[in-house]
Image (cartoon, rainbow, N blue to C red):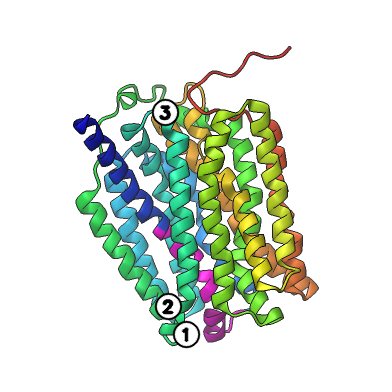
């Protein structure tokens, strides 16, 4: 029994360290929305440039995510994680020292590419340490850590910025130092082990692997839901602090806290909803995803109309609950019948590519709409309907909770 406990603790320690390093890296990309007013003031950015800057951390993923995951899944997850963390720290330093908008944009673009290039490591590590029936639970823990770290980062970034005398470069240097420390910790403590599922790797060639992954329709369906949700999410992360500051004189501290509550509640909701989904039937799983899409769209829309900070905390928490779909749809690649380990890695990147398309479109659409109609609030209200894509996903997707075959047709 003691030996079993040691193994359990060790596997969670390995995955936990990977999760923490990964979500801290993501937090540093997201928290730039808090820094955007200071960056715009120093570099005199237009609304369109602000939108492109917010999108740039994800735009490279649209073109490189699939080839990167296909290529990177050949390598050990420990090495892949180490290299991408180290490169991420370098790109943060580049952004902090940028003398022009062009260099800042290049640094953020590179940071986004290496952040997504890290994702195949998760798909390779999880089958090494966990049984298939545990994958959704593991992803829910990842989502919870995402909520804690990213939500906490949005809480903390305004205070770090204030302590730095509103110098956004100093904040990026703090992020650089933190990511460097996490890189060293992973180099020392990160581990991997042999996996029985890796012994029968893909036959038929590398391009056959891509063909098989692209042929899984469930990946496209789940990715479509992520796309719509990510449009609203990235738009609000980048522009909501600016809206609250300019329209309602709400400080960056409060707007960061409001957004942070939503992300934190999303992490907690992910654990609860994952357990619920594993316990209910297929039809009710579909209804759950559909309802979450409606809740997300309505809450985003409401956030643009309300100026009461206490009420906004409640609305943001409800919005976060809607994000409880994340570990459910993120687990789809792991449960496809007959899928192999490297196909899971590539399939996960395919889903995240569609999510990245949403994160690129969100800020860019808001920036363009704001220039066209002259009102940031109206632009955000238009984009807030994008999460209704989850209704389509919930309708079409068969949500599995283990390596189970498709149910027999009713016809």
Which is nearer the eye, 137 or 125?
Answer: 137
Precedes in sequence: disc 2 or disc 1 = 2
Q: Secondary structure at mark 1?
A: loop
Is residue 270 at least partly visible in the picture? yes
**Number of marks drawn:** 3
Residue at the image position 60 percent from the left and 51 percent from the top: 321
**Magenta-highlighted residues:** 24-45
Left or right side of 282 for 178 = left
Q: Residue 359: x, y in percent?
A: 59, 57
Pointer 3 local density, CA inside 10 Å: few below 14, some 14–19, many at least 20: some
Residue at the image position 51 percent from the left and 20 percent from the top: 404
| Residue 288 on the magenta segment | no
Left or right side of 308 for 2 = left
**71 is higher (above) or lower (below) than 306:** above
**375 is higher (above) or lower (below) than 10:** below
Residue where numbered disc 1 is placed: 166
Residue where numbered disc 2 is placed: 160
On residue 132, the disc is: 3
Q: CA distance from mark 3 to mark 2?
A: 41 Å
Q: CA distance from mark 2 to mark 1?
A: 9 Å
Precedes in sequence: disc 3 or disc 2 = 3
Label 2 vs label 1, nearer the camera: 2
Residue at the image position 45 percent from the left and 41 percent from the top: 139
- Please identify the quadrant where the C terminus is shown: top right
Circles 3 and 2: CB atoms closer than 8 Å: no
Which is nearer the eye, 215 or 169?
Answer: 169
Q: Main secondary structure of the magenta part?
A: helix
Q: Residue 104: x, y in percent?
A: 47, 73
Residue extending farthest to the right is: 373
Left or right side of 269 for 21 = left
């Amino acid at each position: 029994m003691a030996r079993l406990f040691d193994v359990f603790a060790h596997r969670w320690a390995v995955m936990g360290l990977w999760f923490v390093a990964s979500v801290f890296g993501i937090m540093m990309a997201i928290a730039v929305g808090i820094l955007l007013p200071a960056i715009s003031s120093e570099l005199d950015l237009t609304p369109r440039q602000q939108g492109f800057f917010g999108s740039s951390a994800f735009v490279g993923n649209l073109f490189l995510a699939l080839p990167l995951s296909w290529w990177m899944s050949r390598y050990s997850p420990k090495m892949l994680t180490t290299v991408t963390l180290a490169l991420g720290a370098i790109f943060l330093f580049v952004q902090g020292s940028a003398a022009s908008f062009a260099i800042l944009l290049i640094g953020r673009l590179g940071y986004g590419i290496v952040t997504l290039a890290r994702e195949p490591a998760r798909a390779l590590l999880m089958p090494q340490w966990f049984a298939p029936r545990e994958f959704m639970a593991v992803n829910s823990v990842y989502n919870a850590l995402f909520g804690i770290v990213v939500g906490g980062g949005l809480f903390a970034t305004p205070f770090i910025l204030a302590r730095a005398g509103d110098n956004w470069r100093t904040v990026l240097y703090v992020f650089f130092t933190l990511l460097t420390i996490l890189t060293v910790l992973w180099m020392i403590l990160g581990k991997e082990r042999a996996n029985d599922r890796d012994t029968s790797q893909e036959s038929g060639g590398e391009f056959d692997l891509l063909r098989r992954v692209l042929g899984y329709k469930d990946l496209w369906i789940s990715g479509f839901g992520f796309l719509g949700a990510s449009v609203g999410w990235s738009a609000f992360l980048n522009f909501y602090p600016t809206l609250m500051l300019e329209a309602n004189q709400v400080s960056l501290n409060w707007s960061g806290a409001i957004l942070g509550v939503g992300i934190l509640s999303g992490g907690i909701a992910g654990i609860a909803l994952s357990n619920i989904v594993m316990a209910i039937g297929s039809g009710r799983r579909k209804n759950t995803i559909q309802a979450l899409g409606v809740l997300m769209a309505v809450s985003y829309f409401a956030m643009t109309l309300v100026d009461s900070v206490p009420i906004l905390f409640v609305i943001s928490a409800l919005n976060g609950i809607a994000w409880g779909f994340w570990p459910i749809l993120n687990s789809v690649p792991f449960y496809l019948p007959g899928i192999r380990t490297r196909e899971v890695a590539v399939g996960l990147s395919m889903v995240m590519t569609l999510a990245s398309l949403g994160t690129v479109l969100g800020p860019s659409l808001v920036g363009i709409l704001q220039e066209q109609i002259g009102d940031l609030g109206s632009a955000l209200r238009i984009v807030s309907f994008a999460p209704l894509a989850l209704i389509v996903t919930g309708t079409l997707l068969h949500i599995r909770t283990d390596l189970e075959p498709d149910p027999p047709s009713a016809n």
